[in-house]
Image (cartoon, rainbow, N blue to C red):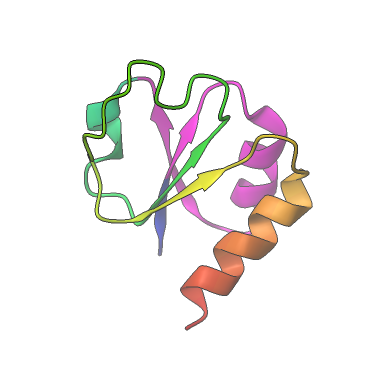
Amino acid sequence: MKRIAIEQNLSDIRSALQEKGYELVEMQKQEDAAGCDCCVISGQDQNVMGMMDTATEGSVINAHGRTAEEVCQEIDARFSC
């Protein structure tokens, strides 16, 4: 099962991913993304301080302006390969 870190404020996307059976980790700080296959961020505070540190080897998906269905489709596409 793929493990996905997701920001707290993305409840609609969280619900959609749970329905699909993904294992979800609530991402409150950068370290929470460690060991996850993918991270979903809101994009509201993306790179605020200009730092480029990475906490995960997985994909980072910016959900800003996107529906839960669009985000789920992107995640499904990345993991179907």
Location of residue 53 in the rendering, given as x and y in whole percent from the top left corner: 21, 34
Q: Judge whether residue 15 is colored magenta.
A: yes
x 33%, y 56%: residue: 58
In the image, 1 versus 40, the foreground residue is: 40
Residue 43, by quadrant, is top right
* Left or right of residue 32: residue 65: right
Residue 14, percent from left and from top: 61, 38
Which span is picked out in magenta? 5-28
Q: At which x and y percent is residue 18?
A: 60, 48
Q: Residue furthest bottom?
A: 81
| Residue 72 placement, left or right of 4 | right
Q: Is residue 74 left or right of residue 2?
A: right
Q: Quadrant of residue 51?
A: top left
Q: Nearer the viewer, residue 36 or 67?
A: 67
User: Residue at 31% across / 21% down in the picture?
Assistant: 29
Q: Is residue 20 magenta?
A: yes
Instruction: Tell which residue pokes out farthest to the top in this image.
Output: 49
Q: Is residue 42 above or below residue 22?
A: above
Q: Looking at the image, which residue is at 62% across and 62% down? A: 74
Residue at point 67% right, 40% down?
13
User: Residue 11 appears at what percent x and percent y?
Assistant: 66, 29
Q: Is residue 3 above or below residue 53?
A: below
Q: Quadrant of the N terminus?
A: bottom left
Q: Is residue 66 left or right of 42 when viewed as pictured?
A: right
